[in-house]
Amino acid sequence: MHYAGSCHCGRIAFDLETDAPITEAYDCNCSLCRRRGGLLWFGTRAQLRLQGEPEALGTYRFNQQHIDHHHCPQCGIAPFSEGVNPKTGEAGVAVNLRCLPELDLAALSVHAVDGASR
């Protein structure tokens, strides 16, 4: 499946390719996710293709500094984060599904993730 996503102003745009339709999302309660309110989908970095220049991304790291939490410096929206999966060593992404305008968020099965306890 192909999904097109972006921040609010469109400066950060990306394409996402998945093997199947997205039907599940994860709602993390860590200090950052709780504040920014994203619904997350996890995949490999190879599934996301950034449109435009990577230099357009603002990046924030906290806690153990392992995940690049990207945001648009212009509108402030955080469309995705990326890092290395500690279990597999593979580059991964966490896409904020709220940045995919064609996705029906009400149809998703949402699972709580206890990131606050980590």
Image (tube, rainbow, N blue to C red):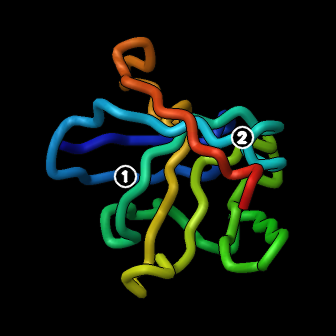
24 or 87: nearer the viewer: 87
Q: Residue furthest bottom?
A: 89
Element carrying mark 1: strand
Residue 24: x %, y % from top left: 35, 33
Q: Is residue 28 above or below residue 48?
A: above
Could you tell me residue 25's position as x and y percent?
44, 35
Q: Which mark is residue 15?
A: 1
The quadrant the C terminus occupies is bottom right
Instruction: Look at 43% across and 12% down and name the residue there.
Output: 106
Q: Name which residue type carries label 2.
A: Asn
- Give the percent coordinates (x, y) of residue 108: 37, 22
**In-front residue for pair 86/51:** 86
Of all residues, the one furthest to the front in this rendering is 117
Report the residue marked by disc 2. Answer: 29
Label 1 and label 2: CA atoms lie apart by 26 Å
Residue 116 image point, x, y percent: 76, 50
* Left or right: 101 as drawn, with respect to 116: left
Horizontally, is 7 left or right of 44 in the view? Answer: right
Residue drawn at the location 64% of the way across and 49% of the way down: 11
In this rendering, the label closer to the viewer, 1 or 2? 2
Tell me which residue sits at (58%, 70%) in the image: 53
Of 31 and 96, the residue lying toward us: 31
What amino acid does circle 1 point to? Asp
Residue at position x 77%, y 37% in the image: 34
Assess disc 1: are there few (<14), some (14-19) or many (≥20) residues with their C-alpha within 10 Å of its C-alpha: some
- Quarter of the picture containing the N terminus is top left
